[in-house]
Amino acid sequence: MSDIKVDGFKASDIIVDLHTAFDSFTDAQRQAQVKKTKGIFELRITNDDKKEAVWTIDLKKNGVILKGLASPKADVTLIMSDDTFSQLASGKMDGQKAFLTGKLKAKGNIMLATKLAAVLQMAKDKAKL
Amino acid sequence: MSLAMLVGGAECGPSNPLQSLSKRFDQDRGVQQDFIGGTRGGSSREVFRTQQATSPELQQHAERFFNSTPAPPTQLVVPQPFNLAGLHDALPQAQASVQSPQTQNPFPSGWASDFLVQQVQTPASAIKHVEAQQDRMQSPISAPMTPGLQGAMPWNASHAGYRMSPMSGMMATVPMPMQRSALQTDQMSWDREFQSQETMLNAHVVSVAESIHTASKPAPKDDMAQLAARVIDAVQGEQNPKFHQSQFMSLMRQFRDGEVIVEEDKIVPSENSTAVHVDVKGKRRAVDIPVREVQEPVRVHSVPASSIQGYQGSVELNEAYRHQHNINNANDAYFQQENEEFSKYWDAHYTGPVPHTISAGEQGSWHELQRDWDAFEATSTGIKALTNYQFQENNPYLLGDSSRTRHHGMHVSEVQRGYDSVLKLEAAVQRDGNNAAAWYELGVKQQENEREKKAVHALERSVELDPTHLGAWLALSVSYTNDSNRIGVYNAIKEWVIRNPKYKHMVQNTTLTTANISSPGDFEALIECLISMARSADEVGGVDADVQVALAVLLNTTDEYAKAQDCFLTALAVRPNDWLLYNRVGATMANNGQAEEALQFYYRALDLNPAYIRARFNLGISCINLRRYEEAQSHILDALVLQDSDGVADNSGMNDKRGVTNSTLWDSLKTTCLHLQRSDLAALCDKRDLDGKFWDII
C-alpha cells in the first residue's frame, strides 16, 4: 500500500482509497469492473510544487492500480493538476467539463477518458434517496 | 380407424358412447396409433376364448351393471352411465349372424347374452343377465366360436383387488363383441387391412428392420433371447414399477431365459418349461401377431412409447390367456386389464416415463418450462413476470390476534407509525394480500430499512392491486431511481402524473406519449409537465410536496442534482417533519459531491426517526467519502444491527438471516475495515458475523 503512496499529493490518498476498495473486491466483482471499463489509464498528476507523480489504473486485464508508467502502453494518458483530480474524484467536477476547460489533457483514446469518473466512483456507494 | 370402420354405417346418435370412444381413438396420433388399433383388434379377437366362474361379490357388481340398462333398446335416451341402448343401436347388422351360435349355446356369457337379449328385444332382459351370470359361474364353457365368450376372456389378468369405474370398463368392453361379430363376416378383409397397416409401419423403418427382421423371423432360440435381453437392457433405466412388473417384461424375461421360444410364428414354451393350457385353435391365431410385435421394440427403437405400450398390451393378453387357470372373474379382470392398459398408455403418453433415451432430455425441458411458467402469471393483459415478495418465516405477528394492532396503526400519528416493524407490516400484508395500502406501507418501510428489492416487489404489488394509489407510484419511482432504472422511474412518474386527479386538466394539455420506451425528449416533456404543475401551486392551494418530490426524483435520474435538491427542500418546507425528505435531500447532496453538507440532513432525519436505517447507512457512506472511517464504521454497524433486528429471532442461532441484512452494507463495512487496516474485521464481514469482535472497537 505504501508503495503506491506519493507524499505531497492529495491524489495519493484518493488512489490509495481506490486501491483499498479494489482489494476488497471479490474476483467476480473485479472482473465485472474490468469488463465495464476495458482500458488502461495512466494518470500524470502535477501538484502545486510542479512535481509530477504517475499512477496506472489497469482495468483491461487484471484490475490493479500501480504506481508508475503503464507497462503495456496505456490506452489513454490523462494529465491534470492535483486539485482537478481531487475534484473529479469527489464528483464536484465532471471529466468532460475539465477537458473542455483545459484542466485535463488527454492523449490516446479520449472516449475512454470519459470513463475515468466512473472508475473513480466505483469504490463509492451511492447514497440512496 | 379400426373401430370406426367396424361400426361404420351405424346410425350413431350424438350421445352414443361407442361413437365417443371411437372418436377418442380416432384422434390424430399417427402411424403408431394405427398400429395399436390393429394390434388390439388382432390380439384380442384371438385370445378371448374361455369362460371363468365369477366370484359372488363381483357378480353382484356385474348384475348391477347390467340391470341398470334400460330395457327398450330402440329408444334413444339421454346417456346414462350404464346405458347400453345406444350401443345396441350402433351394432352392425352383422349381429344377425352372431345369433345362430348364440342360440345353440343359450347363455354363454353375460356379455353375449346381454347383447343378444337387447338385440331381440326381450323384455325380461335383466333377469336373463342374472341367469346368464349364474350359468356362467356353474359351467365355464369354452366354445371357440361364441363371440360373447371371446369378449370376456382376455381380461382375466391377475390383479383382483383392482377397482375401476364401470363406465370406462363398459366403453372399452363394447368394441369386443361387436368386433367379433363383424369379424366373423368380414374376417378376411380385416386381416388384409391389418396386414397393410403393418406394412405401412414397417416401411418407415425398413432399413433397420430388414436385417433384424429377417434374422429373427426363423427365430433361432438364442437370437430371440438376445433380442429379449436387449429389450430388457434398453428399458433398464425405466422408473415405473408398473412397467417392470408388466407381463410384457416378464415375457421378455422368459425369452431371455429361454423359457419360451419362437417357433415359426408362434410362441411356444420350450421343452423344459411348464406346459401352458391353451386352446390350440385360439392359440395359433392369438400368437401370430404378437410374436412379430415382440420384435418391434427392438426393431423400431425410436418409435415412441405409445406403440411399445401397445405391443405390451397385446402380449399381456397372451399372458393372461396362458394363465387362465388363475382367473376368477371375467368381467372384473377385463375391466381391470383394460384400465391398466389405458393408464399405461396414458402414462407413457403424458407423464413420459418413456423407455427410450430422448425422454430424459425432453422431460428436463418440460420441467424447465414448468419452472419458468411458475415464475410468470397470466393476467387479462397478458403474461408477465410474477413478483414474489419473500416473506420471512415464523413471523410472530402472524400468531394470535395482533391484526388488531395493525388496524390501530391506521389511526395513530405519522411519527408513531415510523416505529412499526417490518414484521408487523409483513403480517398485515400476509393477512390481507389484496390490500394495496398495506403493500405500500410495507414497501416504504423496506425502503427505509435499506432493502430495495423487497421494497420494489411490495410497491409493484401495491400499484398492481390499486393503480390509483399515487403514493405507491411515487415511492416506486424512488426505488427505481436507487436501482438506476431510468425507464422504470419515467414510467412510474408518468403514471403518477396521469392518475393524479388534481392535475387532470394540465395533463390533458401536454402530450405525454403513451409509449413505454423513454427517450430524453420524453424526460424533458415530463419534467416540463411537472414544472407547470408545480407552478400552479397557487391554484390548488399551496405547494404540493408530492409534485416537488416527483420532480426531484426525475431530476435525480437525469443527474441534475442541484435542481433536485431545490425541489426536495421546497417539499421539506411543506412537510418539515418528514424524515424521508431529509434523507433525500442529503442523498442528493452526497451524490453531488457535497458529502459534508449532506451530513446535517442525515442527522436531522435520524433525529426524527432513529430507526431510519437508510439514513444511517447514507451517513456512513458520506463518512467514508470524507475519510472519517471510524465514524463510518460505527454508523454502518448500527445500520446492520438495526436491519438484523427486523429478522425473526432465530432460536437455532445459526447465521441464516435469510437476507434480513443487506450485502451492500456488509461490503461497505468491509471496505471501511480495510481502510482502517483491520483485515481481521474485514474477514468477519465476509462471514456476515455481527456477534464478532466488532463490539470491542466501538
Image: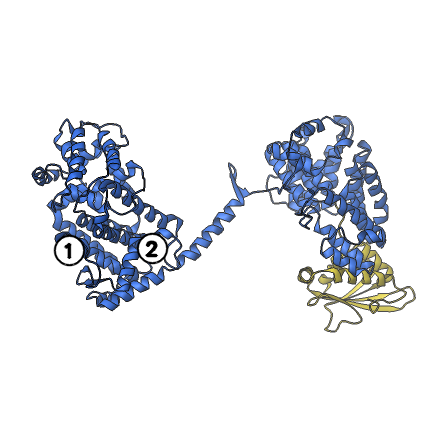
Chain colours: A yellow, B blue
Please name whichever residue, B508 or B598, is drawn nearer the observer in this view of the structure: B598
* Marks 2 and 1 close (CB-CB < 8 Å): no
Instruction: Give the alpha-carbon distance from disc 2 to disc 1, as whole Å.
Output: 29 Å
Where is residue B674, by image quadrant? bottom right
Where is residue A95, by image quadrant? bottom right
Please name whichever residue, A29 or B566, is drawn nearer the observer in this view of the structure: A29
Looking at the rendered structure, the kind of residue marked 2 is Pro
Describe residue B115's horizontal placement relative to residue A73 as left or right.
left
Provide the chain ID for the residue under circle 2: B
Describe residue B604's horizontal placement relative to residue B295 as left or right.
right
Residue B73: x %, y % from top left? 18, 29
Describe residue B669's horizontal placement relative to residue B211 as left or right.
right
Residue B560 visible: no
Give neighbour class at mark 1: few <14, some 14-19, many 20+ (Cα, 10 Å): some
Q: Residue furthest right?
A: A49
Residue A48 vs B87, above or below: the answer is below
Check residue B284 in the rendering and tell me which mark sits there, or answer none. 1
Looking at the rendered structure, the kind of residue marked 1 is Arg
Please name whichever residue, B552 or B514, is drawn nearer the observer in this view of the structure: B552
Check residue B304 in the rendering and tell me which mark sits there, or answer none. 2
- Answer with mark 2 or mark 1, whichever residue precedes in sequence: 1
Residue A74: x %, y % from top left? 74, 70
Please name whichever residue, B562 or B586, is drawn nearer the observer in this view of the structure: B586
Provide the chain ID for the residue under circle 1: B
Where is residue A76, by image quadrant? bottom right
Give neighbour class at mark 2: few <14, some 14-19, many 20+ (Cα, 10 Å): some
Residue A66 vs B198, above or below: the answer is below
Q: Residue at x 22, y 44 (%)?
A: B3
Residue B535 vs A23, above or below: the answer is above
- Identify the element where label 2 is drawn: loop
Residue B681 vs B106, above or below: the answer is below
Q: Residue at x 10, y 36 (%)?
A: B106
